[in-house]
Image (cartoon, grey):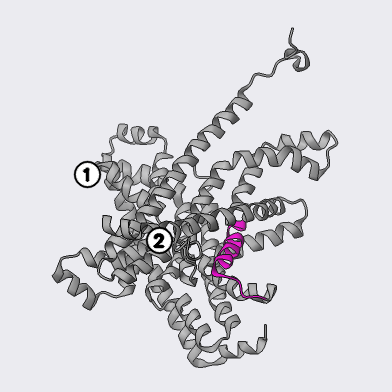
Amino acid sequence: MTEILSQYGLLLLVGQFPDGPIGGLALTLLMSVAALLLAFPVAVAVAIARTSPIPAIRRAAAFYVTAVRGIPLLLIIFWAFFVLPLVTGVTSSPEITVICALVVYEGAYLGEAIRAALEALPKGQTDASRSLGMSYTATLRKVILPQALFNCLPSMMNQFVLIVKNTSLAYIIGAQEVTFSANSINAQLLTRPFEVYFILAAIYFILCYSLSRLSRVVENRVLRKRSRVTNQPITETPSLARVPS
Amino acid sequence: MNLHSLAVLADPNVQLLFLRGTLTTLELFFASAIAAYALGALLVVIRMSGWLPSAAVGAFVEYHRNVPSIVQIFVWYFGVPQILPQSWHTYANAHLSAFFFAVVALSLNAAAYISEDLRSGIRAVPTGQMEAARALGMSYLKAMRWVVVSQAVRGAAPALVNQALGLLKTTSLALAIGVKELMYVARQLDGETYATFPSYLTPTLIYLACTLTLMAIGSRVQQSTRFTR
C-alpha cells in the first residue's frame, strides 16, 4: 500500500498538474468550493422565495425544490451535459458541467437549510423591524438574513461535506478528480483494487470526517453565541445602562 | 432541441429497454431497502446491548457517512473480492453479479444512516417511559417492545421515509459498475440514438413518479404521527 502511495500519491493529490490539467484531490476541492460559492446566492434566493409573501413565487420555488429532491444528482449532471451547450453554444468541460449541476442541486438543498434558519427566527424580529418602518427588503437585508445566515453556518458546512462527496460523481462524465485518479491507478495496476480503493476511501474519510468535526465545533460556537444573546438580562433603562461613567 | 426525437419513445424496443431498466432500479431499491432497515435495526440493538464495543458500530456509521456512496460501491465490487480467500474469489467471480455487490454496498450505506435515525428516535423517548413501564412490572424486552420502540419508530418515521427516498436515488450510482438500471439504460439509448432529450426525459419522469409517491407517503406518515406525544 505504501508503494502505491509513494508512486501515485501525487496523481491522487493534484493529478498531472505541472504537466497537464489540475486533477486529483485538488480538483475535487476546487470544484466543491466553486459549487458552494456559486450555489450560495441561488440558495439564499430560493430560501427567500420559499418564504415570500407572494403565493406564485412561493409555489414556483416549491416546485423547483421538489423536482430537484425527486431526481438523482446523476440525472441532473446528465441534463446539464445536454442543456448547457444548448444555452451557451459551446461544449463545456465535464468540470464546469458538474459544478453547474451541483449549483442546481445545492440551490435546492442549501436553500431548504437556509429556509429552516429563516423560519426559526422569532417572528417578533420581522414584526419589530416592519413596525419601525423598514421595508420588506430592508428587513430581510438588515435584520433577518444576517441572523439567519449566521445561525445556519453549521448546516452550510454539512452541505459542503455533501458537495465534496457528490463531486465523486464527476468521474462518471470524465472529470479528472480524485475518484478518476484512483480508477486510472487501478487500471494501471490491475491486480490490487482493494488497496487502491481503500486509499481512495481513506482520503475522502479524512477530509469529510474532519470537516464534519469542524462543523460540530462551529455549531457549538453558534449555539453559545445565540444563548448569550437571548439570555442577556434586559436592563430597565437600556439607553442609560451602558453609558460609561 | 427538436421534438421529433421524441418519436424514439414510440419504438417498442425502447419501451422494453426502459421497462427493464425501471424494474432493475426497483429491484435494487427493494432489495437494499429491506436489507438496510433490518440491518439498521440490528445495529441499534448491537449498539445498545453492548455485544460489540460501541466504537465499532460508531466507526461503521462514520465510514458510511464520510465516504461517497460511489466509492463504497467500488470498494465492494472491485476491492473486496480481491481480499477474499482464493476459493471464495473464484465463486464470487462465477456467481455474484454487479447487482449483488451494488445491493450490498447500498444497503450497508443506508443501514448506517437508518441506525442513526432510529437511535436518535430512541433517545428522544423520555427515560421516564422506560422506568414507568418497568415499575408496572413489564420485563425489559416487553417495555422496549411496547413502550420505547413503538414511540421511537413513530418519532423517527419521517426521517426513515426520507432514507428510502435517498436510497431510491442512490441506486442510480449502480450504473458505474454496469448494473443495467434506469440511468444505465438512458445513457445507452442516448449513446445509440443521439436522442438525448427523450433519453433523459423518460428517467426523469419515472424517478419523479417514484419519489413523489414516497414523498406523499412521507407527509402522510408525518401527519399521522404529529400529535402523538
Please indicate, yes or no, whether residue B34 appears anywhere in the rendered image: no
x, y (%) of residue A64? Answer: 65, 63
Identify the residue position indicated by label 1 in the image: B51
The three-letter code of the residue at mark 2 reads: Leu
Quadrant into which the N terminus of chain B falls: bottom right
In depth, the one of A86 and B108 nearer the eye is A86
Q: Measuring 25% from the left and 69% from the top, which residue is drawn there?
A: A191
Quarter of the image for residue B77 reads bottom left
Residue A102 in the magenta stretch? The answer is yes
Q: Measuring 59% from the left and 63% from the top, which residue is drawn there?
A: A68
x, y (%) of residue B123? Answer: 40, 39
Chain letter for mark 1? B
Provide the residue span drawn in magenta: A90-109
Q: In the drawing, what numbered circle is on residue A11?
A: 2
x, y (%) of residue A116? Answer: 61, 46
In depth, the one of A164 and A174 nearer the eye is A174
* Above or below B196: residue A128: above
In depth, the one of B7 and B153 nearer the eye is B7
What kind of secondary structure does the magenta stretch mostly adopt? helix
